[in-house]
Image (cartoon, rainbow, N blue to C red):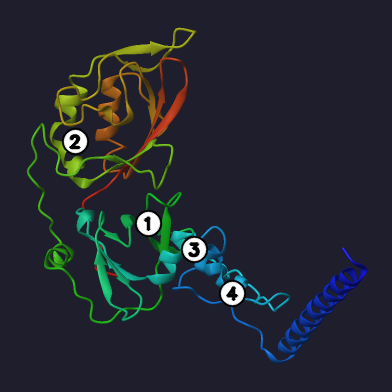
Amino acid sequence: MRISQIKTLCWTANVLVLAGAGYVAVHFGETFKRRRIIPEIEWPDEGGGDVIQKRWPGEVTGFRMIWDTPVNGLVPKPPAPPAKVEVEKDLGKIFLGKYTYHTSIDTFPELDESVAYVEGPGSGAVTMLRTGESIDGFTLIGFEASTERGEDALVFSNPKVDGLVRMKRSEDPLQNLTTPPLVRALADNNDLAQPEVDLMSIPRRAYQDLLADPSGLTWHVPAGEVYWWGAFGEDDVLAKLVVNVAKDAGGNAMGIKLMSQPGAGTAVSDGRGLMKGDIIKSINGVPTRSKEEIVLYLRGDGQGLGRYEVLVENETGVERTLVYEVERARRRSPSR
């Protein structure tokens, strides 16, 4: 190759390099101008939804603003993560914040017909609730009256909430209450008729009062079952109960041992907390060394009481006290 040709090639190469450098310089100049005059670009919302999720991984269109930006251009800032909305997880607090317990009408002995009046949110509509009915997933399981705290409450349960939810009664009265006809009749009736009962049927059965005692040792005996015991208890439960006299190490009688299941063959065959093999040591502190002593106590000093505490010892020697809260037929006026 001749020297003149080499010079021509070098000159051409230099021209091309200078032209490229000029192009790059012009491009950077334009970019600098754009950075000064173009406002900050907003990240586009491609079809709605969470833009952050569309960046990676996600739809390819979420990258369009990146590859459309010139070299050394201004890439828009990604949007800030959406603010987390704090959700109240305590369903009990939410429930208590929505509803207000104003008043109730309690009837005895038919407590299942008692009605609570609860005011709801928004329009303030009043809902009548009976035991076993639900509102917003919370089931009314009982009425609670506390003389110690000086407040009444409705007790609710919800499978999604640990423990029980107590709705305290408001001091604000409700006007123009609508009383269900049956509740009004029960509340106005001073002479509640004794229902007919039979040996195998109890209108309302005793139940473990877990509100009063979570251990399950406290039993609530409704008036319906009280009637049943008055009719059949002595002849069909106590008289047919097989017992032995239990003695301590010194040979002294300390109670009666149940050799058969209390109430076998009757409506109370589950024993109401008493089991075969238990030793009944006392009732309300009065020693019980024979069935006759139990009958004498129930006919005498123990007649008509509202509470009986029975001291029992099981076959392993462990003592427990069964409590029976007895509901007596009476009327409490429509209230509160």
Q: Which residue is mark 1?
A: 155
Residue 65: numbered disc: 4
- Asked if residue 336 can be seen in this view, the reply is no
Kindly identify the residue that appears in the image at 24 percent across and 15 percent down.
242
Relative to 111, is 43 above or below? below
Relative to 261, is 47 above or below? below
The quarter holding residue 154 reads bottom left
The secondary element bearing badge 3 is classed as: loop
Q: Which residue is mark 3?
A: 59
Give the camera-side residue of 302 and 168. Answer: 168
Give the percent coordinates (x, y) of residue 60. 51, 64
Q: Nearer the viewer, mark 4 or mark 2?
A: 4
Q: At label 4, which amino acid type do we have?
A: Met
Indicate which disc, 2 or 3, sits on the residue closer to the N terminus: 3
Q: At label 2, which amino acid type do we have?
A: Trp
Q: At label 1, which amino acid type do we have?
A: Val
The secondary element bearing badge 4 is classed as: helix
Kindly identify the residue that appears in the image at 31 percent across and 37 percent down.
302
Q: Label 3, label 1: how many angstroms apart (C-alpha)?
A: 52 Å
Relative to 98, is 212 above or below? above
Kindly identify the residue that appears in the image at 37 percent across and 70 percent down.
99
Indicate which disc, 3 or 1, sits on the residue closer to the N terminus: 3
Give the percent coordinates (x, y) of residue 50. 50, 68
Q: Nearer the viewer, mark 2 or mark 1?
A: 1
How would you rate the neighbour count of disc 4 (Cα within 10 Å): few for under 14, some for 14-19, many for 20 or more? Answer: some
Q: Which residue is mark 2?
A: 229
Q: Label 4, label 3: how many angstroms apart (C-alpha)?
A: 13 Å
Give the percent coordinates (x, y) of residue 153. 39, 62
Q: Label 1, label 4: how many angstroms apart (C-alpha)?
A: 59 Å
Q: Nearer the viewer, mark 1 or mark 4?
A: 4
How would you rate the neighbour count of disc 1 (Cα within 10 Å): few for under 14, some for 14-19, many for 20 or more? Answer: some
